[in-house]
Image: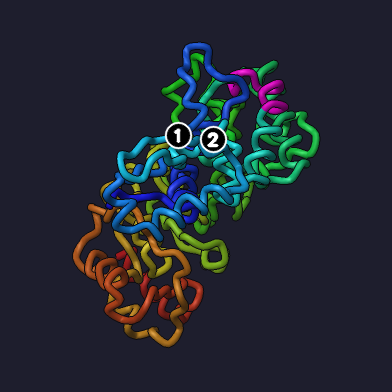
Amino acid sequence: MAKLLLPEAASAQLARHYQRGHAAWLHATEPPDATSRWPWRLPLGSPTEAEATARPTGVRAWVQAWQAWPGPGVVQWHTVQWPRLGSQHLPQALVLPGPEALADIAGQGRRWRRASARLGSLAVAWPPLAGANVSQRVFDSLADDTDDDIQRLAALLHWVATQPASGLTLRQLPVPGLHTKWLEQRKALVLDLLALRPGADAAAGRDLHAHLGLTRPPVRLRLRLLCPQLRQGVGGLTDLEAPLAELAALRWQPQRVLVVENLDSGLALPDLAGTVAVLKLGHAVSQLRQLPWLAGAQLVYWGDIDTHGLVMLDKARQAWPQVQSMLMDPATLRAHHSLCVEEPQPWAGPTPTLLQGDELALFNGLVQGTWGHQLRLEQERLPWNLVLRALAAAWR
């Protein structure tokens, strides 16, 4: 028997179709060259006379089910003339006038209507949105964000439309209610919308500052001058933070540079002759390549024993191949296993390529759970006498 779609099966099929296509159906205005896909027509099946004779109860239930269909959409009927059973009035297709009807069938009618209504007002603030295909991220924002969030988004887009190359910093944006945390949480959404602008700079990629026409604040670096002699050249300062470009221009030559992942560990370091400590760079450790005075220095990296710490070591070595590590090996982890905590989100990117010997064994063991699930040994937890002995050994 030919498959006859009952309302329940048809609804499930249409709900799946809605989930696949609803974001692409949302337009503030229909593109002028678009061929409208609406109304949508779903065939319901067509029994033969032989099938109706063999299974009269099933065919009758199918007809009655569609006779009771309350909507949305309209059931299209047709009349067939069978030699034995005579004239029969049968359901032929369910016709849906537009995506709102599919949304109602999928139980998403409220979200669709909210997204559709908000799209029109947002397109006034951001004209490139009119007629454009929106991403799923944009649809979800329009459907689910608060009115305040949508107003804030519209204000930001309107400001960018009128000031595309302001040169301001992010915190200087004169947009009511805008704050950096809000923007950081919606960075991908804002970039999706900015990318709709004709002539959007493809070279800017996913750089929010570039797309907004903003100036990025200068990268700042924090140093601890552990050498009394070096401190004399900067007025006796022991703790120094300044733009990276200014620190790169310093006319000095430290003998040794210790890169420390965490602030507390760096602040606790004692005086060490000829030594400068670079503190708390995180994954921005690759910025070290901009410091020319590192070329003549002995370089040591000391970070947490976790996957991110080892990736940072790898990035430091990409900047300066002479970088050595300190207290980042399996033996240190095993000796202080009781001090370990869980690494909440282990590194999920490419495997580092510049780790050496014990460093690579440590990374692979952490990934594979050799010593436990998602382990992290924070550098601050290590006994301080161990750290001092490791420093003395590193500077030989």
Q: Nearer the viewer, mark 1 or mark 2?
A: 1
Provide residue 321's location: percent of width, then percent of height: 26, 48
Regarding mark 1 in the picture, which secondary structure is present there?
A: strand
Which residue is rendered at x = 30% and y = 39% of the image?
Answer: 83
Q: Mark 2 points at which residue?
A: 96
Q: Which residue lies furthest to the bottom in this view?
A: 338
Q: Which of 315 and 160 is in front in this view?
A: 160
Provide residue 23's location: percent of width, then percent of height: 52, 36
Which residue is rendered at x = 69% and y = 28% of the image?
Answer: 122
Q: Which comes sooner in the sequence, label 1 or label 2?
A: 1
Q: Name the residue under label 1.
A: 78
Whether 122 is among the magenta residues is: yes
Provide residue 103's location: percent of width, then percent of height: 58, 43
Relative to 266, 122 lies left or right? right
Relative to 359, 208 lies left or right? right
- Give the CA separation, mark 1 to mark 2: 17 Å
Q: Is residue 180 above or below residue 308?
A: above
Regarding mark 2 in the picture, which secondary structure is present there?
A: strand
Other-residue count near label 1 (Cα within 10 Å), few / some / many at <14 / 14–19 / ≥20: few
Q: Nearer the viewer, residue 84 or 3?
A: 84
